[in-house]
Amino acid sequence: MVAARRSPVLFETMEGIVPNGIKLRDVSRWRHLIGVIACGLLGLQLMWAGSSAAQTATESDRGHTLVIGHVSENPKKLYQRLKPMATYTIAKMDDVGIRRCEVLIAKDNRQMISYLRQGRVDWVTDTPFSAILYEEKAGAEILLKKWKKGVGEYHTVLFCRRESAIQTLHDLVGRTIALEDPGSTSAYLVPAALLLREGLQLALLASPRERPPADMVGYAFSQQEINTSTWVYRGLADAGAFSNLDWRNDDHSFQTHRQAFRIFHRSKAIPRAIELVRGDLDPAIKSRLKAILLAAPADPDAAAALKAYQKTTKFEALDAADLAGLAEIRALTQIVQRAME
């Protein structure tokens, strides 16, 4: 349980949820942070039908339209990512009544939940944390695991300098950890939930130079993975956290940095990305969509669409390890939610 108590509110971001029960050293800084999180582009609906210009589907068209959705603050970029995959997919769904597709972009998870509840979105691609949220709050159904950028699963690593005395999560009490931003699954939500699960209290700091209370774990947002690595390397933060993929990425963690670091904790592996459908989607459409996605990596005609779709290399059914990873995410989500009570 965190120290401060406030009215329970979830600030939903592109990749997850932010607990407002975490103790802050300065309320004005918290308000500023929320202002930054809350601002962004309004939801933008981008649509197309065949080769014609984008247009709004009529009510009679809805039964023949497949709507793919995602959360983003950059609708134009996301449209270019989703359009090729959607165009490829609907070309193979005429026999189940699907002849057109729309892209519906939500500004945050709350809006996407609303779209799913209203039946305005049929198919969503998102992170595991968001997938669990859509499943629990909107009755969405997890369909497949997506191998985003050729990776099927990943995990969070917490690291410090080799000479540091930190050996366990509890050794972070009275120290500071660098996290990326409130919307990151692997570099904020997972490490924050791991610390809360250990019964540790968290204090948001304005910068890594500010020290936390002696009985709490301080955390500061670096905004970029390379900043997290640099802060730890230079001793501005005692520890850092991001994904094992970032750990191996020289753009996010220089080799000279990694040589000076050691990993003292790893989270359980979780699926990299998830494909979902709304719970009441026509079973025939759901079945056909699943079959198309599973077969796409072997189809030369899908190559360009898969590349645009976050460099997807394949889709597959969730196995026992994936289900265990999702169970871990549900548990971590509950921990964060309880921290707000």
Image: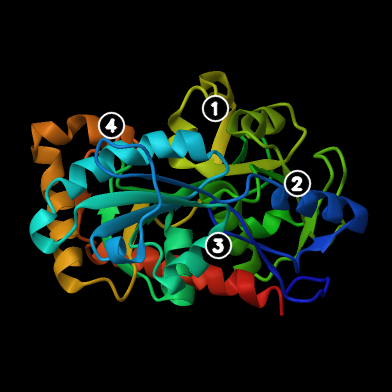
Mark 2 or 1, closer to the camera:
2
Q: Quadrant of residue 337?
A: bottom right
Which three-letter amino acid code belongs to the residue tagged 4?
A: Lys
Q: Position of residue 81 (x, y in %)?
A: 37, 36
Which three-letter amino acid code belongs to the residue tagged 2?
A: Val
Disc 3 is placed on an element classified as helix
Which three-letter amino acid code belongs to the residue tagged 1?
A: Ser
- Marks 1/3: CA distance? 34 Å
The residue labelled by disc 3 is 111
- Marks 2/1: CA distance? 26 Å
Tell me the number on the disc at residue 307: 4
Is residue 172 left or right of 107 when viewed as pictured? Answer: right
Near mark 1 (Cα within 10 A), the count class, few <14, some 14-19 or many ≥20, is many
- Marks 4/1: CA distance? 25 Å
**Mark nearer the N terminus (1 vs 3):** 3
**Mark nearer the N terminus (4 vs 1):** 1
Tell me the number on the disc at residue 36: 2
Residue at image location 19% in from the left, 41% down from the top? 88
Q: In the image shown, does 145 or 197 lie closer to the viewer?
A: 145
Q: Quadrant of residue 287?
A: bottom left
**Mark nearer the N terminus (2 vs 1):** 2
Q: Is residue 183 above or below residue 159?
A: below
